Amino acid sequence: MPTLMVQGTTSDAGKTTVVAALCRWLARQGVSVAPFKPQNMALNSAVTVDGGEIGRSTALQALACGLAPHSDMNPVLLKPQSDCGAQVILRGQVYGNMDALDYHAYKAEAMHSVMAGWQALSARYDVIIAEGAGSPAEINLRANDIANMGFAEAADCPVLLVGDIDKGGVFAQLVGTLALISDSERSRTAGFIVNRFRGDLTLLEPGLEWLSVHTGKPVYGVLPYLHGLVVDSEDSVGTSGSSDAGALNVVVPVLPRISNHNDFDPLRLHPGVNLIFVGPDEAIPPADLIILPGSKSTRQDLRWLKQQGWPEAISRHLRYGGKLLGICGGFQMLGQRVDDPLGLEGGVGCTGGLGLLDMATRMVPGKQLRTVSGTLSPRIAESMPVMQGYEMHNGVSEGAALARPFATLGERSDGAVSADGQIAGTYVHGLFDEPAACDAILRWAGLEGQEKRAVDYQSHRQHQLDRLADQVEQCLDTDRLRRLLQL
């Protein structure tokens, strides 16, 4: 079946949104289409329908196609645990931990998983839109490449090259990338897409004409900079939200290995929330609610919190009546200790927690990967609104604090709430996606007034995908695209 690969001149050139836009554009026409990302390195991931996990950005593209995420769509996922090591996930399941050099040598083997995933998708769908990673012109990574041209060559598919004009130097990006790839890779590069343009297009046209003449390749179109576009990020932390005076101040530390920070996208959009991300060595501002996010390396990030002065800031925050919420790894940090006897998160050992909940966590083999639904505890909201989300963790927590759960998920309980109601924790990611649950948690944290309500985040995501597809219709050469896709 036809496969088209979208590669970028740099990381964050817009590959994810271009693939999502193309997927939505095709799906709206009734084309059977699926996304594919051979290799992804990201700490934002989603649970798949077959019980695995893939990069969150690929799950967004599946949504654009009207599909449930499947592990075939992202057969190799790398989740960094340190600057030189990562957890390797093959077709949705944990394979093991590797340092950078070991994985570089292993890529030839990982390619088998890549091709098996692509072939399985090709048997089920008429068109595959694949996404590269980083740039195809990374000279040091070209040997045994599986993420960009290595896959394109193996699948014998055309490539569109995306450049981000908003960063500047887009012509150098595009021409330079072509100059650094091989003759066969250059010949399969069908053309260019210029992304995130602002201004008068007539001023850009002479440059586009030069680019086509100089390279002998067409420009498929120029996509505009879309203001207010909020879609699932692949790995970069989104900007803080801003709201009117009197909004609830929600503060989130940006842990070195923060994971699944898409949890906070609904709060960025909430009109009653002022969301503040606090990075390393930044002042910790006053807050109504502090949220400790998920972490891929809980013990290491816990040590970082202590080095950055967060325990003292949290103690002061609680003393003045503020609320504290921990999500997944952040929930584990609230306990007495985190024990990793097998080094599942990168190092064997035990680290003392923040000591705010009477519980302890032990890392065990067999990652919990499941979607969940249930109701919030009456300790958080008397109305017990429905919540939905997903779990993705190795840790098992035990202790007296769990007798006061945060939520009920079917026949079991989840998380904990302190006796005084100021501190809560949960293993559930995505808990703000349901508007009723989001508003209930924020009211627990101190949000007042009924006029400021949560955005229906799932409807918002669908609207953003339609915005992207509209730009394909309006700004790209769709006739040329159809020919490229053999439609």
Image: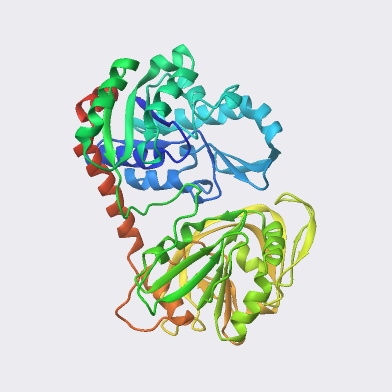
Is residue 126 something one can see in this rendering?
Answer: no
Q: Against 479, is 296 above or below?
A: below
Residue 155 location (% of width, % of height): 45, 21
Q: Quadrant of the C terminus?
A: top left
Q: Classify 23 as above or below 135.
A: below
Quick one: which residue is furthest to the top in this view?
183
User: Residue 484 at x, y = what percent?
Assistant: 28, 23
The front one of 329 and 140 is: 140
Q: Quadrant of residue 121?
A: top left
x, y percent for residue 75: 52, 36
Q: Residue at x 61, y 65 (%)?
A: 330
How far from the left and from the top, in percent, is residue 131?
43, 34
The quadrant of the rendering that contains the N terminus is top left
Quadrant in the rendering for residue 470: top left
Please count the marks in the image.
0
Residue 289 in view, yes or no? yes
| Residue located at (70% from left, 66% from top) | 306
Looking at the image, residue 410 sits to the left or right of residue 28; the answer is right
Residue at the spot x=36%, y=37% of the render? 165
Of residue 138 and residue 109, the one placed in the foreground of this image is 138
The residue at 45%/13% (across/down) is: 184
Q: Is residue 325 above or below residue 62?
A: below
Colour logic: rainbow
> In the displayed structure, does residue 111 sit left or right of residue 149?
right
